[in-house]
Image: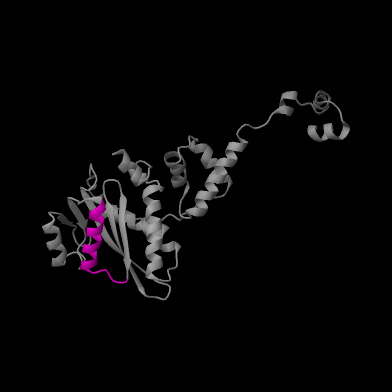
Amino acid sequence: MAIAARDRYGVSVRFVCQCLDISVATYYYRPKLSIENQRIADWLLRLTMTNKRWGFGLCYLYLRNVKGFGWNHKRVYRIYHELELNLRIKPKRRIKRDKPDALSVPVAPNQVWSIDFMSDALSDGRLLRTFNVLDDYNREGLGIEVDQSLPSSRVIRSLSQIIEWRGKPSAIRLDNGPEYIAQALIDWANKRQITLMYIQPGKPTQNAYIERFNRTVRHEWLDMHLFESIEQAQALATEWLWRYNNERPNSAIGGVPPRQLLQAA
């Protein structure tokens, strides 16, 4: 009102402030954080558009630990809420069970890897399988192999390719699937002095690290795409795995990406 009155009648700022009963300091006040808030909003919109499955926690950890911004989480959440970016999550009814023993956490890379299969389908209905490999130390995804069929020979080939650039693990945790109990895989592991740690049948919680990784794979990659071919699925898997290892904060390892923890180690 003061600015409009000054422009319309051509009077002084002091006179306008006296007429409207406001202080001169109020007239000249400009919010100092408006530009910074706009920057936060731009980052949040970009992150939620690029990673549609990320909630506030992952967005804030990415801004703090990956990009190095020192914004307070309450301030970032206020802007996140004002932009109406909140993900609505319907709580599930859970059955109370005895708490299982926690898995031991390796203290160095390549001590224990976890492997597991996942299933999906192409747009034409053909079966799609993935073979996932995880380093339990920093929750780093070492590989996602995609094909219609993944027998034990493909498992051995995928593991051998990863070992060429990553190094050999001391042990591999796996379930009792037919591809894993095949004699060819057992002979391959014995030849390289790699211990195969089989979990109990029907106890996926004993392989919890890879199961949690599979959930993220399902939530942020498989459910977000309609695959036309195996080649397209493999290309998207490689692209997503790079973002997972290098950019996506992981709350299980302190809110930093897996590759950042590996570099610190």
Q: Is residue 52 visible in the rendered structure shown here?
A: yes
In percent of width and height, residue 152 lies at 21, 67
In percent of width and height, residue 157 lies at 23, 63
* Mark count: 0
State the quadrant of the C terminus.
Answer: top left
Q: Is residue 121 left or right of residue 4?
A: left
In percent of width and height, residue 23 lies at 75, 24
Q: Is residue 109 left or right of residue 245?
A: left
Q: Which residues are magenta?
A: 148-165
Q: Quadrant of residue 116?
A: bottom left
In percent of width and height, residue 191 lies at 11, 58
State the quadrant of the N terminus.
Answer: top right
Q: Is residue 86 visible in the rendered structure shown here?
A: no
Q: Is residue 60 left or right of residue 193?
A: right
- The residue that appears at 36% across and 57% down in the rendered structure is 215
Q: Residue furthest right?
A: 9
Can residue 258 be found in the magenta stretch? no
- The one nearer the camera, 99 or 213, is 213
- The one nearer the camera, 169 or 13, is 169
- The residue that appears at 81% across and 35% down in the rendered structure is 4
Label the magenta part by its dominant secondary structure: helix
Asked if 119 appears above or below 21 in the picture, the reply is: below
| Figure colour scheme | one colour
Q: Quadrant of residue 174?
A: bottom left
Asked if 55 appears above or below 17 in the picture, the reply is: below
